[in-house]
Amino acid sequence: VQLQASGGGLVQPGGSLRLSCAASGFILDYYNIGWFRQAPGKEREAVSCITNTDGNRHYSDSTKGRFTISRDNAKNTLYLQMNSLKPDDTAVYYCAADPKVGLADPMNRFEYKYWGQGTQVTVSS
């Protein structure tokens, strides 16, 4: 199982970025999948996820309405479209996956077994 995140970079406040997470060794559609982020000096926090039981999308309060999670099953790839970016969104972004059916808390990072290497997002003028 491998996850390869990409798409990070430097963007001005109010700008947009799209992150990608290419999965290999497993079928993304069968897994709980999500995006997490970690800013310097802070704990890793959930951004958004898709659960494998019902396909529901979950968002953190700070990203709801600005970020959109999606997946392309044909490409076995997870995406995070980030709009209206703020300096507080600056962090390393990680994708994660877990095969369990029925996660107790899909927005809890400890529920996820497999992690990508992270991609840096910096929002600054």
Image (tube, rainbow, N blue to C red):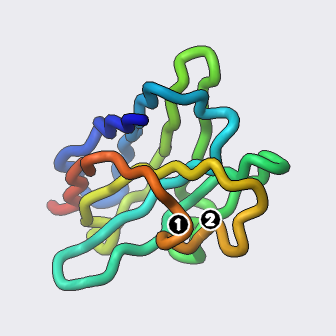
Which amino acid lies under the numbered mark 2 shown in the image of this protein? Tyr
Residue 83 located left or right of residue 33 = left
Q: Identify which residue is drawn at 42% across, 35% down.
A: 1
Q: Quadrant of the C terminus?
A: bottom left
In the image, 33 versus 99, the foreground residue is: 99
Which amino acid lies under the numbered mark 1 shown in the image of this protein? Thr
Classify mark 2: helix, strand or loop. Answer: strand
Q: Does 109 appear above or below 52?
A: below
The residue indicated by pointer 1 is 63
Mark 2 vs mark 1, foreground winner is 2
Q: Identify which residue is drawn at 38% across, 38% down.
A: 3
Task: Please tell me in which quadrant of the rendered image residue 111 appears.
Answer: bottom right
Q: Does 37 appear above or below 108?
A: above
Q: Identify which residue is drawn at 48% across, 44% down.
A: 80
Q: Does 19 appear above or below 107?
A: above
Residue 40 is marked as none
Residue 94 horizontal/vertical position (percent): 35, 54
Residue 25 horizontal/vertical position (percent): 46, 26
Distance (Cα) linking label 2 and label 1 = 6 Å
Which residue sits furthest right? Answer: 54
- Label 1 crowd (10 A; few <14 / some 14-19 / many >=20): some
In the image, 78 versus 1, the foreground residue is: 1
In the image, 3 versus 19, the foreground residue is: 3
Q: Identify which residue is drawn at 60% across, 56% down.
A: 49
The residue indicated by pointer 2 is 59
Task: Please tell me in which quadrant of the rendered image residue 31 appears.
Answer: top right
Residue 88 horizontal/vertical position (percent): 31, 74
Classify mark 1: helix, strand or loop. Answer: loop
CB atoms at circles 2 and 1 under 8 Å apart?
A: yes
